[in-house]
Amino acid sequence: MRLSRRGLLRAGLAGTAATALGGLASGCAVPTGSTGRNMVLWYWSGGLSDTVVKKAKARYDSSVDLDAIQIGGYYRSKLITTMTGQAHIPDIAGLKGEDMASYLPNADQFVDLRTLGAEKLKSQYLDWKWQQAVAPDGSLIGFPIDVGPVVQYYQPAVYEKAGLAYEPDDVSSEMNTWDKFFAAGEQLKKRIPGTYILTDVGSVFEMSIGQGTTRYVNRDKHFIGDGEHVRVCWDRAVEAKRRGIVSDLVTGTPDSISATEKGRLPSQLNASWAAGDLKLQYPKTKGRWRVANCPGGPSNVGGSFLAITKACREPEKAFEIITWLLNADNQAQGFVDAGLFPSTPASYDMKKLREPDPFFGDQITMDVYGPAAEKIPVAFNSPFDVALGQPIKDEIKNVGVLGKDPKKAWRDAMSKCRRIADHLGVSH
Amino acid sequence: MATVPLVEKPPAPAVEPPTPNPRKSIRSYWRLYAAISPFYLLFLAFGLIPVGFSLYLSFHRWDGLGSMQYAGLSQYKYLLSDTDFWSSIGNTIIIWALATFPMIFLAMVTAVMLNSAVRFKKIYRFAFFLPNVTSVVAVAIIFGSVFSTNFGLVNALLQAVGLDQVAWLNTPWGIKVAIATLMTWQWTGYNAIIFLAGLQTIPGELYEAARVDGAGPVQTFFRITLPMMRPVLLFVLVISTVTGLQSFSEPQVLLQTTANESTFSGGPDHAGRTMVLYFFQQTFDNNDFGYGAAVAWGIFLVVVIFSIINWRLVQRRGED
C-alpha cells in the first residue's frame, strides 16, 4: 500500500492519541501483579547480596522467572507510589528497617507470613528483629534480612598514645559505660590536644535511645518523648558537650574526613554496616582501625526486611524464595558481599564470617558484632516516631553545633513535639 | 493562550466578510488541533490531574498507603500556625536575596565586558554558560569542600589576609551565605548571556549620538544602556525568582548529614531549610502526605504573591 505524506501524518497522530488515551486507561483496567510465572523482586543497591540473587535465579529457573530489580533513588516513595497505583506491584518487596514502623499500620497490603508457615522458622532469627515486623493485629509482614549492631570503631595507635586501653577486649571492658567512655575522652583531649573522642553529640543521643526499650511514642499512640528515658539520653549528650570531648566538625564533611585520617577523630560509634563506609571513605587508614563494644551496651541502627505483597499470585512460591534467600548460609554470603550483618545467629560461627579483616588489623570482627547483635533490646517502633523524634534530635544538634542553651533547647523541642502531636492526633 | 494581538488591526474592509461559524472552523481545523493534542493530553495526565489531586489530598490525612481520612481545613489551620513553615519561607527569601542581587550585578558587569570588543568571545560565552549545565549535586559537593571550616578554600583565603576562620556550614548565616554563593556562581553566567543578548539589541546610533553629545562611559551606561535593558533586567529578575523560590538540591546536598539524620533538615537550626525542602521533609520523611500537599499549596501561594509583585513592577515600569 502506498502511503501519502498526509496519510502517514494522520496515522501517526491517531497512534499518538491512542497511546496517550490507552496509557490513561491502562492505569485502572490492567490486572495487577504477576501472572504466576513471573516473580518480581524489588530491592535497592546493596540491599541483598548479588551473588545470592544470582544463585536464586538459577535455582528457581525451572518454576518461575525471578526478576530481581534494583530500584534506585528514594526507594520507599517509589514502592508506595506503585502500591497505591495498583499496577506493576512487585511480588516481593524489600522494606527498609527505618521505614518498617510506617508499613505496619497497613499490614493488609502484605501477605501475613504466618499463614505461609513463618512461625516454624522463627527460632532461627534474632527475636528482637522478628518482633519489628509484627503488625498491631499480630500479622507478620516482613522477613528479616540484616541488622545493624552498633559498635565503637577506633584507632588503637591514638588510644595508646593517650595512655588509654587499646586492645579491643580492653577497650570493650574499660569503656563499657558512657561515663568511662567520657572520662577516656577527657584523657584523650588532655594528652593529645585537638583530638576528640566524639564527632558530634547526635551519636551519643541516638545510640543511647537505641539502648532502651522505649522510644518516642508508645503502643497507645501516646507521646512519651518527654519521659525520663529520653531525658537521660539528652542529658548524657549534653554532658559530653559540657566536658568538651565533642569536636565542632560536621560528620561527612572534608573537615571531618581529614581529621579522621590524621587521627584527630580516632573513634566512631556506628552500626556494623558503617565498616563498609570506613573502608570506602578512608582507604589510606587500612589496618589502623579496631572494633570494640559500644559504651553503655548494644544498640541497633538500620537493617531491613523482605515482604510479599497482596498482588503476588503465588505467595507460597514467593515465601519459598524468600526463606531460601535469607537462610543462614546466604546471610553469611550477604555479609561477605555487601556488609549485611546476618539476622541469623547460626551464621556467626561460620568460617567465612570468621576471616581476619585486614582493614581492622586482622581482627575477627564477628567476635564483637555477633554478641552485640544478640543482646539488642526489643523496642516498640511507632509510625509516629520519625515525626516526633525529629524535633528532639534537631535541638540536641543545635546544642552540639551552635552551643544553644540546653534548657532552652529542651523546652523548644518539647513545645514543638506537643504541637506536632496535636496535629497528628497523638495524645500527650 | 496568547490573545494579545501582535500586530495592529488593519482598517476595516469596505465589504463585510461572512461571519465565521465557530463549529465549522473547529471541524475544518481538526488536523491542527490534533497536531497539538499530544502535549495537552500529556499535560492533562501528568500535570493537571496530579495538581487537582494534590488539592484534594490537602483536605485529608494520608500516610501514602492506607485509606484517606477527610480532615477538612485542619491541615491549612496547622499550616498557618506552623512556625517551621514560616521560617522556611524566611530562609528561602533571604537566600534568594543574598544570591540574586550580587548575581545580577556580576552578570551585568560580565555582559558589558563581553560586549566590548575582546578576543575569544565565543570561548568566554561558552565558559560562562558552563556552570549552569553542571550537575547541581556535583557543584554542591565541590562547594562543600570550598566552604569547609578547617581546610576550605574560603577560609584559607580569609586567613591569608589575616582574618579569622568562619564555620560556614555550622552557623545559620554561614549556611545561607554558602548556599547563596553557590547559586550565584551557578546562574551568573547564564544571566550574563541573556544580558549580552539584550545589549546587542541596543542600536549603535544611540551610543554614537551620546558620544557626539559628549557623554562619558559612565553616563552612557546609566542613561542609555540601563534604561534600554530594563525589560531584560525584569526578565532575569522573574526567572531568578522562580528558580530561587524552588531551591532544593543546593541546600540538600550541601548540608547532607549522616545516615541517622534527615537529609532535609537544612543544617543546624534549620538555617538552610527552604520551602521545598520543608515540603519534602513533611511528605516523605514523616509520611504525612496530606499535610505535605497543604504545604505545597502554601508554597504555591507564596509564588503567586511574588509573581504579582513582579508583574506590578513590570506594569509600573511600562507606564513610566
Image (cartoon, helix red, strand yellow):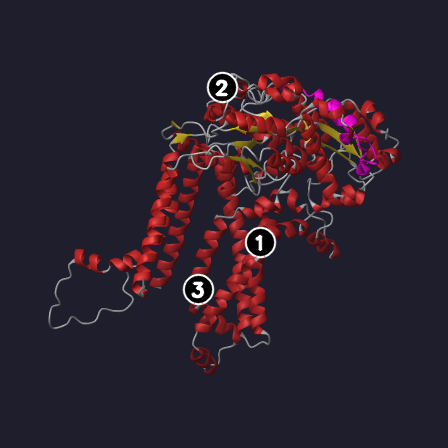
Please indicate, yes or no, whether residue A415 appears anywhere in the rendered image.
no
Labelled disc at residue B135? 1
Q: Residue at x 71, y 21 (%)?
A: A374
Q: How packed is label 2: few (under 14 Cα within 10 Å), some, or many (20 or more)?
A: some
Q: Residue at x 54, y 27 (%)?
A: A317
Quadrant the C terminus of chain B occupies: bottom left
Quadrant the N terminus of chain B occupies: bottom left
Judge depth for marks 1 and 2 and give the one in front: 1
**Who is closer to the viewer here, A13 or A417?**
A13
Element under label 1? loop
**Who is closer to the viewer here, A237 or A312?**
A312
Q: Amino acid at mark 3?
A: Val
Element under label 3? helix
Q: x and y percent of residue A33 in the render?
A: 45, 34
- CA–CA distance between discs 3 and 1? 26 Å
Labelled pair 2, 3 in contact (Cβ < 8 Å): no
Element under label 2? loop
Q: Which residues are magenta?
A: A352-379
Residue A365: say if magenta.
Answer: yes
Do marks 1 and 2 both belong to one polypeptide chain?
no
Q: Which residue is mark 2?
A: A427
**Which circle's residue, 3 or 1, is located before the other in the chain?**
1
